[in-house]
Image: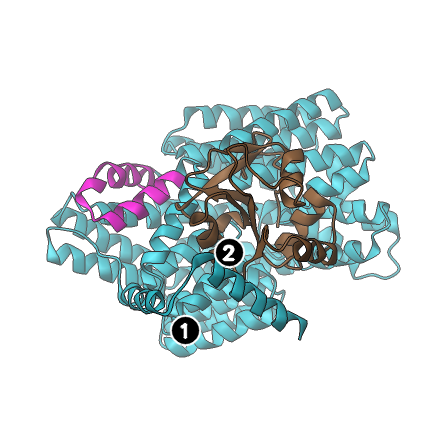
Chain colours: A cyan, B brown
């Protein structure tokens, strides 16, 4: 009742301030209808190129057939090399980091050949790439207001919001669009809900997605991934197998099975499944590297650091030879994270910095993000070795990077590092404020749980423990924290000191 | 969260203390003499609770009482879109929205020289 009253007051206030009349409302309704039926144009002098681009978008968005979509865009751009939106689409979905960079550049340079709304989209992505996030947001909303029901615009918007961890907002944009016949959006929304750990709602979307395109493997593959995120591993494998039954060439499901075995703790089986995938399927370079990294992580999960070093080093050498600087750098950073010997870790971080300095085939955004991740590991290393001056300097450097970039990942690296330093100084209240800004990272989440315990916030500590125990992303951070944490979390007899075992393990590495 | 003003506003930065006085109704006019109009979301919304806590040290109920006692100066809008529409069309208006709602129709006002994505920004987090 109270809520209804407040709502009425708000509507009255709005009308008074804007002086909305019935006539104005009619015009607004007409304009709204025009906007609702509008679709974002694809400006090209070649009708065939446009057709190919439209098909590419549908293949990518609804069926996640990325390689096929990329092939179509290559063909479209051959027909019209000045097709600005064609270049932008390719920049967004390419699996080749050099192509991502060069295509974004081309799209931006050729934007004068496109319509005003296409220019807005290209500039939005350029701004995002340049860390001009406020400008990127205003352009995103400008475009969305022109095309609130265009599937492509709604999909692009919700996708970008998801990359910004704006899951609730992405769901709101989708709900407002009224679109209910887009398989790609059903898929996208399910992932947004999974990111919010609203798994039951995510499964509802997945049921709709499967129903929308029953003969396609991707709905089964996505369903499997969300089941895996929810910790329902056996069901996840069943759905991955269902995807492969529909299309035996659907390689991501093969690697999904491997990832799932790894998360289940069966590393030998996981590696066997990864190897089956590498043997059976020709992969794009970045995908090959992604799953090789996951395979390397299996060694970390079982504590075989020698095996992990060998596997990660092979990826770094390959990336160096292929001039993929950011991947090479990130591989050395991940190696540094699990090293027992701080000197070795430091050497690996130096290698990570050196690779990043080469900056080959990497966007400015990814370079800055990686630099922040490296700095974060340096701070954690400094804490482990008691070099608190270095730890503080590292946090200061990250603060400046976060200030100048406005990038969420960099900001999270700063918050996580600042929180870790404060925890090591037993400043729990202050640590909480920072660690709450980095809750996607298991390392920070574990410290946050401890900080809540120390400050007497039992409910928050319990909630954080539940979240941490339920993390099922196949990342190095998850591998280093969650399995050890989960063992103790599931054992009521486990003592408080044992519950923090993985933190101690991290700090003593 | 972002503090916004109309495009014609000459205010591009406010000090945190001045923001408090704008939001608690003490400051009633801008330096150029224009009346201050504060456009807010429902005080009990999670975003507004963050603003109330960090800027005014107030509960939602206290904020509701404040709004009622300054009815000409405060407006409660039902959505970010409504806040943006009202602020963009009202000289002297200042509003608060989620920064992912921002449009080109308003200016973003810095707090203590910091924009929403800067570290140390007062209204970071939602």
Region in magenta: A98-127
Q: Is residue A93 above or below residue A232?
A: above
Label 2 belongs to which residue? Answer: B80
Name the residue nearer the viewer: A475 or A162. A162
Residue B15 percent location from the top left of the image:
62, 32
Which residue sits at x=50%, y=54%? B83
In the visual, does A158 lie left or right of A431?
Answer: left
Label 1 belongs to which residue? Answer: A245
Do we see residue A338 in this rendering?
no
Name the residue nearer the viewer: A197 or A247. A197
Residue A303 percent location from the top left of the image:
68, 45
Q: Is residue A312 magenta?
A: no
Residue under mark 1: which chain is it in? A
Quarter of the image where one finds residue A110: top left
Secondary structure category for the residue under label 2:
helix
Q: What is the crowding at mark 2: few (fewer than 14 residues within 10 Å), some, or many (at least 20)?
A: many
- Work out which residue is located at the far front of the displayed protein and give it: B33
Q: Is residue A109 magenta?
A: yes
Instruction: Report how far apart the C-alphas of labels 2 and 1 lie in the structure.
Output: 47 Å
Name the residue nearer the viewer: A315 or A385. A385
Query: Is the magenta region chiefly helix, strand or loop?
Result: helix
Which residue sits at x=23%, y=60%? A54
Residue under mark 2: which chain is it in? B
In the visual, does B88 lie left or right of A2?
Answer: left
Q: What is the crowding at mark 1: few (fewer than 14 residues within 10 Å), some, or many (at least 20)?
A: few
Name the residue nearer the viewer: A429 or B88. B88
Residue A471 - label:
none
In the visual, does B71 lie left or right of B108?
Answer: right
């Amino acid at each position: 009742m109270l809520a209804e009253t407040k709502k009425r007051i708000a509507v009255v206030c709005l009308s008074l301030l804007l002086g909305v009349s019935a006539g104005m409302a009619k015009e607004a309704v007409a304009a709204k209808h025009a906007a609702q039926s509008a679709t974002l144009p694809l400006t090209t002098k070649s009708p065939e190129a446009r057709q190919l681009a439209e098909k590419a978008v549908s293949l990518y968005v609804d069926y996640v057939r990325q390689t096929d979509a990329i092939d179509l865009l290559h063909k479209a751009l051959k027909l019209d090399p000045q097709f600005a939106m064609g270049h932008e689409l390719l920049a967004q979905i390419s699996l080749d980091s050099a192509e991502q960079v060069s295509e974004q550049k081309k799209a931006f340079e050729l934007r004068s050949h496109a319509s005003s709304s296409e220019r807005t989209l290209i500039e939005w992505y350029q701004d995002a790439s340049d860390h001009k996030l406020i400008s990127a947001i205003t352009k995103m909303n400008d475009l969305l207001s022109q095309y609130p029901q265009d599937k492509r615009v709604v999909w692009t918007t919700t996708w970008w919001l998801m990359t910004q961890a704006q899951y609730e907002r992405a769901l709101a944009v989708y709900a407002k669009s009224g679109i209910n016949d887009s398989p790609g959006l059903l898929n996208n929304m399910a992932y947004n809900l999974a990111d919010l750990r609203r798994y039951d709602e995510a499964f509802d979307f997945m049921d709709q997605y499967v129903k929308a395109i029953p003969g396609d493997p991707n709905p089964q593959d996505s369903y499997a991934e969300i089941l895996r995120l929810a910790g329902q591993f056996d069901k996840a494998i069943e759905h991955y197998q269902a995807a492969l039954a529909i299309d035996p060439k659907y390689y991501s499901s093969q690697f999904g099975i491997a990832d799932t075995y790894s998360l289940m703790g069966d590393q030998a089986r996981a590696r066997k499944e990864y190897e089956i995938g590498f043997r059976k399927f020709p992969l794009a370079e970045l995908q090959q590297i992604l799953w090789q990294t996951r395979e390397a992580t299996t060694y970390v999960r079982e504590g075989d650091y020698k095996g992990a070093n060998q596997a990660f080093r092979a990826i770094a050498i390959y990336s160096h030879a292929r001039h993929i600087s950011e991947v090479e750098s990130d591989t050395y950073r991940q190696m540094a994270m699990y090293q027992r010997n701080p000197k070795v870790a430091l050497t690996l971080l130096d290698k990570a910095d050196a690779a990043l300095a080469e900056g080959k085939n990497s966007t400015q955004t990814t370079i800055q993000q990686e630099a922040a991740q490296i700095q974060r590991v340096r701070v954690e290393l400094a804490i482990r070795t008691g070099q608190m001056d270095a730890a503080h300097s590292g946090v200061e450097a990250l603060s400046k990077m976060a200030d100048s970039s406005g990038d969420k990942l960099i900001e999270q690296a700063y918050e996580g590092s600042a929180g870790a330093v404060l925890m090591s100084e037993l400043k729990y209240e202050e640590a909480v404020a920072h660690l709450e800004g980095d809750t996607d990272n298991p390392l920070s989440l574990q410290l946050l749980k401890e900080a809540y315990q120390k400050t007497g916030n039992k409910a928050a500590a319990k909630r954080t423990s539940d979240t941490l125990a339920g993390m099922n992303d196949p990342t190095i951070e998850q591998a280093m924290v969650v399995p050890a944490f989960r063992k103790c979390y599931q054992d009521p007899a486990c003592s408080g000191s044992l519950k923090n075992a993985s933190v101690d393990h991290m700090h003593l590495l | 969260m972002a503090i916004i003003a109309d495009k014609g506003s000459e205010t591009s930065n406010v000090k945190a203390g001045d923001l408090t006085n704008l939001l608690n109704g003490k400051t009633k006019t801008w330096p150029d003499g224009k009346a201050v109009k504060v456009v807010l979301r429902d005080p009990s919304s999670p975003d507004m609770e963050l603003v109330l806590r960090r800027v005014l040290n107030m509960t939602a109920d206290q904020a509701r009482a404040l709004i009622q006692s300054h009815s000409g100066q405060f407006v409660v809008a039902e959505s970010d879109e409504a806040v943006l529409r009202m602020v963009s069309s009202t000289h002297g208006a200042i509003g608060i929205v989620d920064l992912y709602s921002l449009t080109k129709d308003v200016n973003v006002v810095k707090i203590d020289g910091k924009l929403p994505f800067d570290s140390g920004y007062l209204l970071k987090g939602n």
